Image (tube, rainbow, N blue to C red):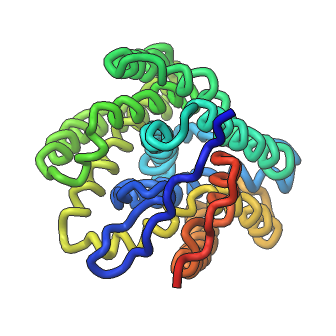
Amino acid sequence: MQHETLPPTPAPTGPGQPATTASGRPRIAALDVLRGFALCGILLANVKPIAHMVHSGEVTQPAVVASQDGAWLGLFVDQRFFPIFSLLFGIGFSLLLDSARRRVPRPRVLLLRRILVLLAMGLAHMFLLWRGDILTVYAVVGLLVLLPSTWLPRWAVAGLAACLVATPLILGSNGVTVVPGLFLLGSALTRYGVIDRIERSARVPAVLGLVFAAGAVPATWLQIRSGAAGTDDFSSWFALAGLLTAGVYVCALLLLLRTPLRPVLQRAFAPLGRMALTNYLSATALVLVAARLVGGSPGDWSQTTVLLIAGVILVPQWLVSTLWLRRYRQGPLEWLWRWATWARRPPLRRAP
């Protein structure tokens, strides 16, 4: 039997040295920034649903909350960030597959193990802390859709992605129903080489951002109108507005990363993004603690209260992530996940 080997340990980074991932692949800074940005929005959207666990012991709102009013959470947060996270999951999966193919004889076995470990973490999170866990959904969709898609040609993956994103919108669904399509879209973008060129062009994100914005504005207006009227097409407009607004956010960030704001954005979001799994899971516990301290029904909390709770959690997470990554290569849960994926203990501490 051939044994899988860990990829080469990346060289320490420093001035004049390109940053690398734990797999030794050149790190795409934009992905870390996007992941950290999405993590912030996901926490904002999840504060109230998680807090309901303190009062009811069960989820009283879905993981993706469909706000039917004109409040800013419903217009700029709900359904606007988890599509980015889902897209990034598909991208990361395909990047890992590409790396594993060069290093192990059976790369899909490695990916299967990675998904199963994610499923175990998601189930633990679901039953111990919050029933609205998304990791379980990601793992199941990964097993049923993403992993089998690795045997398909990239044109087929792109076609399936388009169908699986459009179908829920047509049927009036939102939330996790678009996850399979977004996973495949991220995979297709990677396999067509778009992700490797993601930071080389300003024209493409500028044009796409304008297209997304042109669609997001009327879709959001129709979301507000249908929500106020209580019509049946609210879910469709809510989902469409969310996807288009997420596209605007992604394109805007990619453009800002080509400006003098790049160092600021990297310092603000990259540490959170590089420890996304650790921060996502720890945020649930922190929201539950905050809910007990704040008191009252989460349904009665103002948007300011939600923003303050998220800020009180994100600022310490950013600080811990920044300090941790100065000494260690990955977050603690990311490191354990990598250990389980490759079936060998990887180095954690950075070389002096």
Left or right of residue 344: residue 9: left
> Residue at (57%, 58%) from the top-left corner?
276
Residue for point 42% across, 38% down: 98
Q: Taking 270 as reference, is 196 left or right? A: left
Q: Nearer the viewer, residue 197 or 87?
A: 197
How many numbered marks appear? 0
Residue located 16% across and 47% down the image? 206
Q: Residue at x 25, y 63 (%)?
A: 257
Relative to 305, is 240 above or below?
above
Residue 22 shows up from this direction: yes
Question: Left or right of 224: which side holds 209?
Answer: left
Name the residue furthest left: 203
Whether 9 is drawn above or below 105: the answer is below
Dividing the picture into quarters, in which one does residue 306 lie?
bottom right
Decide if residue 138 is in sight here: no
Image vertical order of residue 169 relative to residue 57, above or below: above
The percent position of residue 247, horizontal first and vertical second, equals: 33, 42
Quadrant in which the N terminus is drawn? top right
For the view shown, which residue lies furthest in the bottom direction?
352
| Image position, residue 126 (x, y; %) | 79, 44
Give the vertical position of 297 relative to 203 (above or below): below
Residue 289: percent from left, percent from top: 79, 68
Q: Position of residue 331 (x, y in %)?
A: 61, 66
Residue 73 vs residue 122, the one in the foreground: 122
Based on the displayed image, in which of its 4 quarters is residue 60 positioned?
top right
